């Protein structure tokens, strides 16, 4: 995977990584948030990417969909 990282952030201050023209956030960064376990339940069944250098990557679209619902309702997609 080639990496073209720009200094962009998304919800809750997570850094956005662009790899092969796809945007991701790192699971390691999500783990630092107090609601990681809540997010992890919501992410069950979602596709993620493993990168040798960055670890597990979550599609930005999935992260932002979760974030919008969480901010608006305090819930995730399985609630």
Image (cartoon, grey):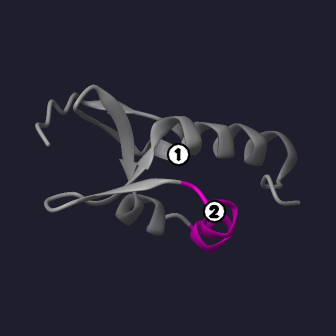
Q: Nearer the viewer, residue 67 or 34?
A: 67
Please give the name of the residue rendered at 22% of the width and 28% of the height, measured from the top-left corner.
6
Q: Is residue 10 left or right of residue 44?
A: left
Q: Quadrant of residue 39?
A: bottom right
Q: Secondary structure at mark 2?
A: helix
Please give the name of the residue rendered at 62% of the width and 62% of the height, measured from the top-left corner.
45
Please give the name of the residue rendered at 41% of the width and 61% of the height, measured from the top-left corner.
27
Q: Secondary structure at mark 1?
A: helix
Where does residue 33 sit, x and y in percent of width and height?
A: 52, 63
Q: Is residue 43 covered in magenta? A: yes
Q: Quadrant of residue 17?
A: top left
10 Å crowding of disc 1: few (<14), some (14-19), many (20+): few
Q: Is residue 67 left or right of residue 32?
A: right
Where does residue 1 sit, x and y in percent of width and height?
A: 14, 43
Q: Quadrant of residue 56?
A: bottom left
Q: Is residue 3 covered in magenta? A: no
Q: Nearer the viewer, residue 60 or 31?
A: 60
Quarter of the image where the C terminus is located: bottom right
Q: How many numbered discs?
A: 2
Sequence-wise first label, 2 or 1 = 1
Q: Are marks 2 and 1 in contact (CB under 8 Å)?
A: no
Which residues are the magenta region? 34-46
Where does residue 55 sit, x and y in percent of width and height?
A: 26, 63
Q: Which residue is mark 2?
A: 39
In the rendered view, would you say 49 is above or below 5? below
Q: Nearer the viewer, residue 22 or 72?
A: 22
In the rendered view, would you say 43 is above or below 41? above
Estimate the spatial distance between the alpha carbons at disc 2 and disc 1, rounded to whole Å: 13 Å
Looking at this view, name the residue that lies furthest to the bottom.
Answer: 37
Where does residue 50 sit, x and y in percent of width and height?
A: 29, 60
Q: Which residue is mark 1?
A: 12
Nearer the viewer's eye, disc 2 or disc 1? 2
């Amino acid at each position: 995977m080639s990496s073209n990282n720009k200094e962009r952030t998304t919800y809750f201050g997570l850094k956005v990584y662009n790899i092969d023209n796809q945007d991701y956030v790192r699971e390691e960064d999500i783990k630092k948030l107090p609601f990681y376990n809540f997010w992890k339940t919501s992410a069950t069944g979602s596709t993620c990417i493993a990168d040798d250098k960055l670890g597990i990557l979550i599609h930005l679209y999935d992260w932002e969909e979760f974030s919008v619902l969480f901010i608006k309702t305090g819930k995730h997609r399985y609630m």
